[in-house]
Image (cartoon, helix red, strand yellow):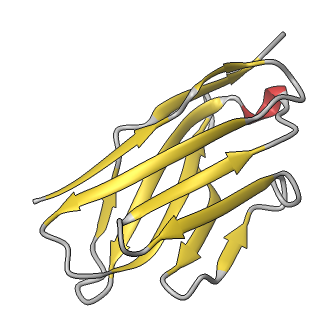
Amino acid sequence: QVRVVESGGGLVQPGGSLRLSCAASGNIVSIYLMGWYRQAPGKQRELVATITSRGNTNYADSVKGRFTISRDNAKNTVSLQMNSLKPEDTAVYYCIITTAFSRNDYWGQGTQVTVSS
């Protein structure tokens, strides 16, 4: 059993910052990939950022230069620092982990981020 739990969402004004955190626990030997996706109302879920166990990162073009992903391999946690937030960043943000050997994906329940004045 693997559990993925996000925290840190909320309401912020345009131009503001938020930090999302995600912790994975349970029957995990090693995690290959950790990342964040988001889904806005009426839209498909889209990739925001991912980071491998070696620290290689990948960002959606829409968040490059504004968001920073980081992880702590020892604690099985991943964070997303979001700066210069825009109304179009409003969405439910989901954490995903991909285990190293079985390459199974596990999703969190999502956390709401709302950017509005």
Tell me where residue 76 appears, x and y as whole percent: 36, 66
Q: Residue furthest top?
A: 117
Viewport quadrant of the C terminus: top right
Tell me where residue 17 appears, x and y as whole percent: 77, 34
Tell me where residue 92 appears, x and y as whole percent: 54, 33
Is 95 rendered above or below residue 35? above
Residue ID at (22%, 59%): 25
Residue 45 at least partly seen: no
User: Could you tell whether 46 is left or right of 22 in the image?
Assistant: right
Residue ID at (41%, 42%): 6
Q: Nearer the viewer, residue 55 or 99?
A: 55
Is 27 rendered above or below residue 16? below
User: Could you tell whether 108 is left or right of 41 in the image?
Assistant: left
Residue ID at (48%, 32%): 111
Residue ID at (49%, 46%): 21
Q: How many marks?
A: 0
Quadrant of residue 48 within the rendered picture = bottom right
Tell me where residue 54 appears, x and y as whole percent: 54, 88
User: Could you tell whether 36 is left or right of 100 in the image?
Assistant: right
Residue 16 at least partly seen: yes
User: Could you tell whether 33 is left or right of 4 in the image?
Assistant: right
Viewport quadrant of the N terminus: bottom left
